[in-house]
Image (cartoon, grey):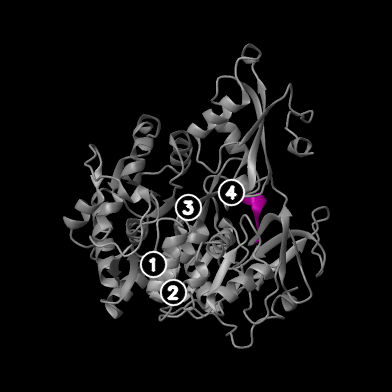
Amino acid sequence: MKEVLIKSWPKELSETLNYRLGEKPLHEYLIQNAIDFPNQPGYLYYGNTITWKQLSDDTRKFASFLQSKGIGKGDRVALYMQNCPQYLIGHYAIQMLGAIVVPLNPMYKSSELIYFISEAEIKAIISAQELYHHIESIKSETPSLQFIVTTNYTDLLPEQLTLPIPEELKTERKFINNTYDMTNMIQSTDPLSKAEEIDIWDDVGLLVFTSGTTGRPKAAMLTYGNALFKTAATVHSYGLGNKDRTLANAPLCHIAGMVMGVNIPVYEALFCVLFSRFDTEATIQAIEKYKITKFYSVATMNAAILDYPGIETRELSSLELNFATSFGMKVDEKLANAWKKLTNGCVLLEASYGLSETHTCDTFMPMDKIKFGSCGIATYDTEFRIIDTETGEGLPPGKQGEIAVKNPGVFKGYLNRPEATAETLRDGWVYTGDIGMIDEDGYLYFQGRVKEMIKSSGFSIFPEDVEALMSDHEAISQIACIGVPDPKRGESVKAFVVLKPNYKGKISEAQMVDWAKEKMAAYKYPRFIEFIDHLPATSSGKVLRRLLKE
């Protein structure tokens, strides 16, 4: 199989991955960028240009503050905010201490946070001020949480905006009792003198919550080396360089957004326009004003730009390469041709196949041999197997089975979950739970999921997680959730609910949807609820979701 996987390797691309500054954690790349390119712009945030020296200095100061509060090697510290420079500072400051970054989606609400904080035994949270109330209400239920740092997005917005900002960035700055203000702590603290010694291939630097194969979210333990490897592999396979100008508007709390917005600019010391979230007009303006050359997107973003009124008069010809993900709609030849015409030549292709357990980006698409419908070929030092789900035997090209992958990006396992780890991680191979096929040229095709995870608007939703949260409703006796097709989101959650006898006829399905909307992140709450008399189940009581789907 290995020979098939490298059959389509581009001739102009080295088969050996060489790290730009050697095998060292990415925060050391940041420190070196400040030495080599002190006054070079690293990030731009709605008009605020942040040089490599500024970013490194602020990060080292914040790391020193965290150290003064007792944060050290192995401690878990969460980031709970929209995309912003403070996210970058927090991420690298935590890792400079050998501590572990735990990204929390800013859409999470109190009942969800209780689970994540407790599961990872999070010691501190760095939170946006507008999200703090979700944490405040649960402090008594999260004993591992020792202190909270808050920040306001306006602290790093410029006086003179050069790009339009979303409403959530206009929140008034305030002082919050019993928390530490991030900006004040940076301004009043001396820089960290020396970063912690790191064993990059053994020390964990990141915990990403994911489903694995079943159950509520589990924390995948990713090393500093996992991040370095996948970042370098992506940079080199797509030919990104120091002169490129990129744009990041995918969520930094999501593993793909993290690679593109947190890791790649630092690894390659290239310029990045950072947005809190995708906005069509702001993205168009950024491409025009800052001459963006490389762009990571979700296919629906490209469609929104193509459909934008007056787009044919806008200047997007600086774009050279756009790697995109098929969430909500496919990256197909029709979309690619329309994008190429609009931008006067920009190549649009499927970015990669990957998952949290491998720090994503396990494949890349050869730019001179694009196969639409595929995920491209295996990236550096990567092997795939297609496994017969009944016999466990490897399958030849053209046959469909479970995808297994092995490379230096593979995680160490799930935190405190040895059984789940053993199920997914076997002899260095990640058994993904995904169904796929490899063709004669080594291109991987993703064809579905063995596991019952629901994908909505690019987010992973775990049925058991929604069921656990919904079970707090006083009227629910039993519940099971599935994904149903949704033309906008790809999938939405549908919940089948067995009501307690004394609530029948006293509550409507619509009222329960409204309740869920208040309790869960917007992408996660059930859009549809159906009351039924009983759930289909095995003799042992396991709910048969496939029968609900049928």
Between marks 1 and 3 in the image, the one whose residue lies nearer the viewer: 1
Q: Is residue 404 above or below residue 369?
A: above
CA–CA distance in space, label 4 to label 1: 26 Å
Q: Residues within 10 Å of mark 4 (few under 14, many from 20)?
A: some
Q: Who comes first in sequence, dot 4 or dot 3? A: 3
User: Which numbered disc, 4 or 2, marks the residue that appears first in the sequence?
Assistant: 2
State the image coordinates of residue 141 (x, y, percent, origin top left).
40, 30
Q: Is residue 396 magenta?
A: no
Q: Nearer the viewer, residue 483 or 213?
A: 483
Q: Do the CB atoms of the residues marked 1 and 2 lie less than 8 Å apart?
A: yes
Q: Which residue is mark 2?
A: 292
Q: Amino acid at mark 3?
A: Leu
Q: Quadrant of the N terminus?
A: bottom right
**Callout 1 secondary element:** strand
Q: Residue furthest left?
A: 188
Residue 353 screen position, x and y as percent: 63, 64
- Image height of 319 relative to 538, above or below: below
Find disc 3 in the rendering and name its residue. Answer: 207
Q: Which residue is mark 4?
A: 460
**Mark 1 residue type:** Val
* Total number of numbered discs in the rendering: 4
Report how far apart the C-alphas of labels 4 and 3 lie in the structure.
16 Å
Q: Decide which of tag 2 and tag 3 comes sooner along the chain.
A: 3
Which element type, helix, strand or loop, lies under badge 4? strand
